[in-house]
Amino acid sequence: MQAPVIQRVTSLDLTLQRRPWPFADERRAEIDAHFAEQQRAKPSLWNGRVLLGRDPVFSTGRLSANYFETDFASFLAWRDWGFPDPEIFNGFGMGALLASDGAFVLGEMGEHTANPGRIYFPSGTPDLDDISGDTVDIAGSVLRELAEETGLSPADCRADADWHCIYTGPALAMMRILRVDMPGEALCARIEANLAQQQEPELAAMHLVRSRADLTAAMPRFVTAFIETQLGA
């Protein structure tokens, strides 16, 4: 994984293509066996359809890329096996929750998920619900994941106009700051109350980041790279 490259853009031009993925086709049997093994350990894993990207191009104020549909099992194998197809990236949106007192609010993924213990902002690999015509709607994906993971709605936050795109090669995190008019502790408490009502919440705990001292190894590099730029501003 390469060092993070951060680009700030105001628009996302993400086109959906109908195309095969040779990696998934050629290693189908291995992929299915790998997913079956993972599912035995975590029965809640579901082999749904997801969208992956390729051909990212940054120009003045714009990110352009192409997306294609595949199954979660193929994505999981590609991730777990060290990203054997270097032309592909996991391009997802993240809602960077920012409380009124300047604290960032992040969630810790539960043990039953594909990323147990990892700490980051509400997000998810885009799927079929994020398709709008022949494009991928990352802005909509961010709000959908926000509601699913935290119970917050678009009315609870104000989204910045621009995106902070953190590219590491296998991952491209498109982060949009979501400003919430309540202090960090109160925002965490509200989300935790929502999690307590869910039968199997994705998040196991909430974390506040106010300074670099609050950053941990459980946070992916694209998350810490983004927060470092914000804390340094």
Image (cartoon, grey):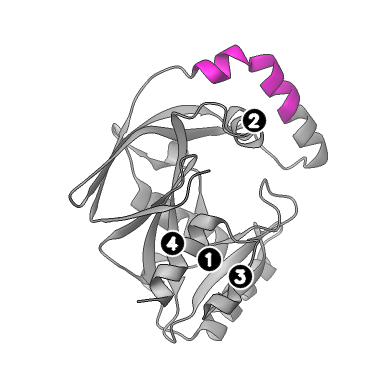
Look at the image and say whether residue 26 sits in the magenta stretch: yes
Q: Amino acid at mark 2?
A: Ala
Instruction: State the residue position of label 3.
Output: 194
Category of crowding for the residue at label 1, using alpha-carbon neighbours closer than 10 angstroms: few (below 14), some (14–19), many (at least 20): some
Residue at 65% across, 31% down = 81
Per the image, label 2 sits on a secondary structure element best described as helix
Instruction: State the residue position of label 1.
Output: 151
For marks 2 and 3, give the CA distance. 32 Å
Q: Which residue lies most toward the left here?
A: 60
Q: Which residues are magenta?
A: 22-35
Instruction: State the residue position of label 4.
Output: 95
Residue at 52% across, 82% down = 184
For marks 4 and 2, give the CA distance. 26 Å
Camera-side residue of 63 and 202:
63
Instruction: State the residue position of label 2.
Output: 77
Between discs 2 and 3, the one toward the N terminus: 2
Whether residue 23 sits left or right of residue 34 in the image: it is left
Q: Are marks 1 and 3 in contact (CB under 8 Å)?
A: yes
Q: Amino acid at mark 1?
A: Gly
Q: Which residue lies most toward the right here?
A: 40
Q: Nearer the viewer, mark 2 or mark 1?
A: 2
Per the image, label 1 sits on a secondary structure element best described as loop
